[in-house]
Amino acid sequence: MRQSNAYIIIFSIITTIVLGGLLSIASVGLAPRQKIQVEKDTKKSILGAVMEVKKTDDVLSIYEKRIESLVVNINGDVVETDESGNPLIAENVSIEKNFKKSPEDRLYPVFLFKGSSNEIEAYILPIYGSGLWDVIWGYIALDKDLNTIKGVVFDHKGETPGLGARIAERDVQSRFIGRKVYDSDGALVSVSLLKGEGNAVKLLDDHHVDGLAGATITARGVNNMLLNYLNHYQNYLRKISS
Amino acid sequence: METETLDLPIVKKEQSEGLLSKRRRKFVTDPLNDDNPITVQVLGICSALAITLKMEPTLVMSVAVLFVIVFSNLIISFLRNLIPNRVRIIVQLAIIAALVTLVNEVLKAYYYDMYKVLSVYVGLIITNCIIMGRLEAFAMGNKAWDSVLDGFGSGFGYAWIILAVAFFRELFGFGSLFGFEIFKAVGIENFPSNGLMVTPIGAFMILGIIIWIQRTKTGYVEH
């Protein structure tokens, strides 16, 4: 009996239904909490570009207080509704999905970091690109002069641990603080990581920071990502500075 | 006359076995050392190399594997007389996969940082040979409680090895344990971190050394 085809089929069906049912219940039940966690994580990395976020900090309430967001297009005009006329929320704009479109069609979220008296302290811009093995992304925060870097965060999907993956570390990211993205003539040059690590001090200037040993291609990815996205945000940055 | 008494059947009182009788204790203690799933059976190496960079994710991974192996052993043992022989592997796999998915969802909801660090390796518990091996070799033929103990044994056997590997990797690779900077705390400010330990090769070497020491002590030889 236990080996008959009918028994096997019925047994398989029951197993599938029971296990599938259990997993659906778990998935539906946990979905709201997972959504909050993802939201927290995104907001944490946005804030991470301008301040040190501790594990115990209430990310959501800090974010609520300090960050104002908007969405712009390639021309630097503020976009308020999506194609179907619904209001756009910058936090919900997927950088990854937009990355797949051509730069002219993308939506570009901007996060404004505000001080206690509501004045803008920094402009936080999302960036996205390719590393060695997979995608890399992050945020760059520009000071109110729209030139000096206030901070950066990078993250990655699959860079080599100990080599390229170091872009996610604080001491690598802090190398960018205080550097300038425009040269003295007002042309965009961005900031790039040099090849190799422990470069001579004379090579490091406003637009060059020490690189990563053994992670030349990841570093190149970071450089391209920064330059590309700063370029895409150019029109917006020009508009608000004038 | 005397021989007659000898011929009398000796009535032995049938005693119910204790929950942790000597036989059952062996289910838990054997896999810790003499029959360790990683160092003796050499199973589950992939995850042992991949997630042992730091103590915290390793601990989470250990707990996840322990949960999956104990409960899948229990469930399979309950169902062992109902599972059709021809589809038993698929049924085992389905149960493991369901439990692993559950762990993954819970991690995502309550421990998002670790969910990000462990990423695919939680899902890969499904293919961890230790679990499937125990189901096929033990839970399919033993009672529920014995199977649970066997699950704990193999789970702890797996856990202590990967925790040992992670201990050395985090200590020498980052100079810290559970993120706490040990060397700084004892006054060694410029401890040089060892880049080799940060790569999977470091895990391979430590694992090799553990296996070497252990087999020297137990006298185990591969046939």
Image (cartoon, rainbow, N blue to C red):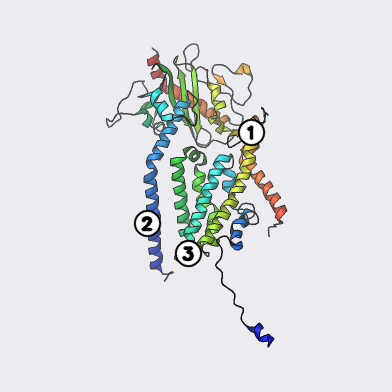
Q: For the residues carrying marks 3 and 2, which lies nearer the camera in this image?
A: 3
The percent position of residue B22, horizontal first and vertical second, equals 61, 62
User: CA–CA distance between discs 3 and 2?
Assistant: 19 Å
Mark 1 surroundings: few (<14), some (14-19) or many (≥20) residues within 10 A: some
Q: Alpha-carbon neighbours of circle 3 within 10 Å: few (<14), some, or many (≥20)?
A: some
Q: Position of residue A193 (x, y in %)?
A: 56, 24
Q: Is residue B133 visible?
A: no
Name the subunit of mark 1.
Answer: B
Label drawn at residue B80? 3
Which residue in the protein does label 1 denote?
B182
The answer for how far apart the CA atoms under marks 3 and 1 are is 49 Å
Image height check: is A214 above or below A114? below
Asked if both marks, 1 and 2, belong to the same chain, the answer given is no
Residues at marks 3 and 1, common chain? yes
Q: Is residue A207 above or below residue B20?
A: above
Position of B192 with respect to B158 (left or right) is right
Q: Quadrant of the N terminus of chain B?
A: bottom right
Pick the front one: B187 or B222: B187
Residue A71 at x, y percent in the picture: 36, 25
Indicate the quadrant where residue B26 lies. Answer: bottom right
Q: Residue at x 52, y 60 (%)?
A: B145
Pointer 3 indicates a residue of which chain? B
Residue identifier under label 2: A17
In this rendering, which labeled residue sits more in front, label 1 or label 2? 1
Have a look at marks 3 and 2 and say if they share a chain: no
Q: Residue furthest front?
A: B1
Asked which secondary structure carries label 2, the reply is helix
Who's the residue at 52% across and 25% down the image? A223
For marks 1 and 2, give the CA distance: 50 Å
Which residue type does callout 1 highlight?
Ile
The residue located at (38%, 15%) in the rendering is A240
